[in-house]
Image (spheres, helix red, strand yellow):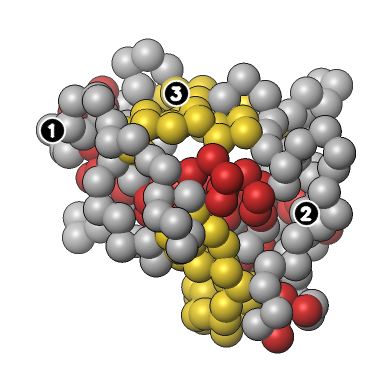
Amino acid sequence: MGQAQSHEPISYDVVSIKLDRAPDSGSHIHVSEDRDSFIATGVTAKYLIELAYEVRDFQISGGPGWADSEKYAISAKMDDDTVEALKKLSREQAIGRRQLMLQSLLAERFNLKLTHSSRELPIYALLVSKNGPKLPPSREAAGRQGYSSNKRGELIATGASMSSLADRLSRELGRKVVDKTGLQERYDFTLHWTPERLTPVIASAADNNQGPAAPALDSSGPSIFTALQEQLGLRLESQKGSVETLIIKSIEKPSDN
């Protein structure tokens, strides 16, 4: 989860929040070229909590139904002093500061109140298959990394670490994925699988250490479980683990402005 920095949190200077009544075209986040603003369309309050606290949907509980259904258009702009202050921070520090700013926005405009908890939940461990990994070392300059895709069921990685891959898999599977590969390098790879509608599994055969509760395979291609083994030499094993969670104690609809 996003952690508070040692310095005081800062807020956006000007914030506009309106109900997004545009035809549903998904959620979109945009950061301006000079990085002085945060612009979002089609986002729910719950999705903003995910961004602000660096958690996934399955790690958030509580709250009214509208927090996960009503969509908003948000425009938040920093003042010049804040922009200059961010330029002096490392990339990681700047990301942490932006998360704090979004946390402040949620507290001030949505009157959000949360409690932190830790629960023993089903997780997936990302492991190396018995025949070893099939991961070419990255050719990119040190520090350069990222993911891209042209469609669901495709992941193109550049300079990716195994911990970042575990995070991406968490989003896809709706369950915490923990890197236990022991692989320390960064890699370039492409992963293709058949997307399926997956939901967090609370009680299933997988919870009894009987292996991943993979859905039925689509005839057009491999599941993400099979694709990881065949294409990357990795596997997912169902385990139990401690997962940090957030509980929404209270939240209010923001005034339209």
Q: Amino acid at mark 2?
A: Leu
Instruction: Residue 108: give x, y in percent of width and height.
Output: 52, 51
Which quadrant of the figure has residue 37? top left
Residue 42: x percent and y percent? 71, 31
Across and down, in percent, residue 127 comes to 45, 63
Give the label on residue 88, or none: 1
Q: Is residue 107 visible?
A: no
Q: Secondary structure at mark 2?
A: loop
Are there few (<14), some (14-19), or many (20+) residues within 10 Å of tag 1?
Answer: few
Residue at left 85%, top 21%? 23
Distance in Å between CA atoms under marks 1 and 2: 41 Å
On the picture, is 173 further left or further right than 32?
Answer: right
Return the residue found at the far top. 33
Location of the N terminus (image quadrant): bottom left
Q: What crowding class fits label 2: few (fewer than 14 Cα within 10 Å), some (14-19), or many (20 or more)? A: few
Q: Does the rendering let one see residue 59?
A: yes
The residue tagged 2 is 198
The mark that comes first in sequence, 1 or 2, is: 1
Type of residue at label 1? Lys
Q: Amino acid at mark 3?
A: Val
Residue identified by numbered label 3: 31
Density class for disc 3 (Cα within 10 Å; few <14, some 14-19, many ≥20) is few
Dot 1 falls on a residue whose secondary structure is: loop
The image quadrant that residue 137 belongs to is top left
